[in-house]
Image (spheres, rainbow, N blue to C red):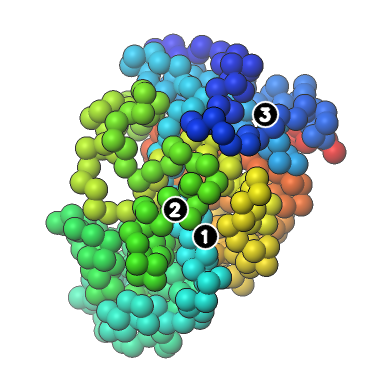
Amino acid sequence: MNKSIGRTPFIFFVILFFCSTSGLSEEIEYLAAEEAGFSAERLERIAPAMQKYIDEDLTPGILTAIMRKGKIVHITTQGYMDVENKIPLQADAIFRIASMTKPVASIALMILWEEGHFQLNDPISKFIPSFEQTKVSSTADASGKTGTLENPKRPITIRDMLTHTAGLANSYIGNKQAYRKAMNLPRPKSNAEQIERLSKLPLNYHPGEQWQYSAATNVVGHLVEIISGQSLDIFLKERIFIPLDMPDTHFYLEDTKGGRLTAQYSPGENNKIRLQDPGSEKSRWITSPRNIYSGGGGLVSTARDYLRFQQMVLNEGEFNGVRILAPSTVSLILENHTDNIPIWLTGPGTGFGLGYGVIVDRGKASTPLSEGSAYWGGAYCTISWIDRKKDLVGLMMTQVRPYTHINIRQEFQVLAYQALVE
């Protein structure tokens, strides 16, 4: 299967990318590479490096984008959004962004923090009483069937949920089967029911003592619902998506939005991609029951929408005259809140803020990102980051899961920074 089709013509892409559905909003401008401190020649290295993954059938199509000084410096589409039907990847394609939902849900909760509804060190049980009874397994076995159950040394706080240090049972460590059964069988009827089930599982460790990736941001999303009195989808729409003009960011879709929903793939034999979820009306983002709004990973979005969100964060809470958060709040979100606790998922040199991973030591992290940069990716091999020191936003979108056998995200980051010469 040969999927090498070259890049979408740049002028067409820019016109399509900048075309708002309302036609009324102020759009992100384009800045020539040299004016933005980039080498145009070095930026040309990105496309061939990405194309090799497409040519080797390791991923269907790839969108890469770089913004600096609030303007687009590089944006390119390659490959297909539907391999079987040979539909080229479109500039306005809709991607499953999975865990890139986490920064959005976390910022939603911080909007409510700014309004005085809670403090970060408040116990989570203040808002979700069932967590007051949650125990800790002495064996880090979330089933609680072995070892002993003991009271936590201190209550789980809201900050613990935002930083993944609450100790929650999860699908990575401990009794993963008990966790998956409790969270998914049968499918919960609401966020409230899902979080109630989670609160009844023993913690893997005492709050604040370790970092473990978990459904903590699902709890964050439900906190938004409890405090605001709105479902998470409505709150995000009214307080973030509409103000920032993000019309293509949703938890579920009514249809393919004019054929813009991408197909999603998984590695098969020899890691060659095979269709997992179509970009058609049969996609589960269209057919699924609409009762769970996952703050930890439920959104679909476009490059245009997510770049606007990230630029708002880089702008210290404001975009195109719309303020979502105060600068001091954004600064707090992007601090490292985990001290020296190892972040096993991202490795040495990294910490965790309120919804974002953060770079604390470039050398240990072996990354081109500046120290203090904030980032996170999604399970379908998407990633985005903001670099405050370089005034830069990076974004890469593709749709393959799992993706641990390829280094495409890291390679794009290296290629982005090697082109930055000022």
Along the polypeptide, which appears first: circle 1 or circle 3? 3
Q: Is residue 393 left or right of residue 391?
A: left
Query: Foreground: 198 or 367?
Result: 198
Query: Foreground: 12 or 397?
Result: 12
Dot 1 falls on a residue whose secondary structure is helix
Marks 1, 3: nearer the viewer = 1
Query: Foreground: 71 or 376?
Result: 71
Q: Residue furthest left?
A: 186
Residue of label 1: 107
Along the polypeptide, which appears first: circle 3 or circle 2? 3
Q: Is residue 185 above or below residue 153?
A: above
The N terminus, quarter of image: top left
Which residue is at a point 71% across and 41% down the rendered structure image?
Answer: 70
Marks 3, 2: nearer the viewer = 2
Question: Between marks 3 and 2, how big is the CA–CA gap?
Answer: 30 Å
Question: Between marks 1 and 3, how big is the CA–CA gap?
Answer: 27 Å
Q: Position of residue 18 (x, y in %)?
A: 59, 28
Which residue is at a point 58% across and 36% down the rendered structure image?
Answer: 25
Which residue is at a point 36% across and 28% down the rendered structure image?
Answer: 257
Q: Which mark is residue 74?
A: 3
Q: From this viewpoint, is residue 285 visible?
A: yes
Dot 2 falls on a residue whose secondary structure is helix
Query: Callout 2: few (<14), some (14-19), or many (20+) C-alpha neighbours within 10 Å?
Result: few
Marks 2, 1: nearer the viewer = 2
Q: Which mark is residue 238?
A: 2
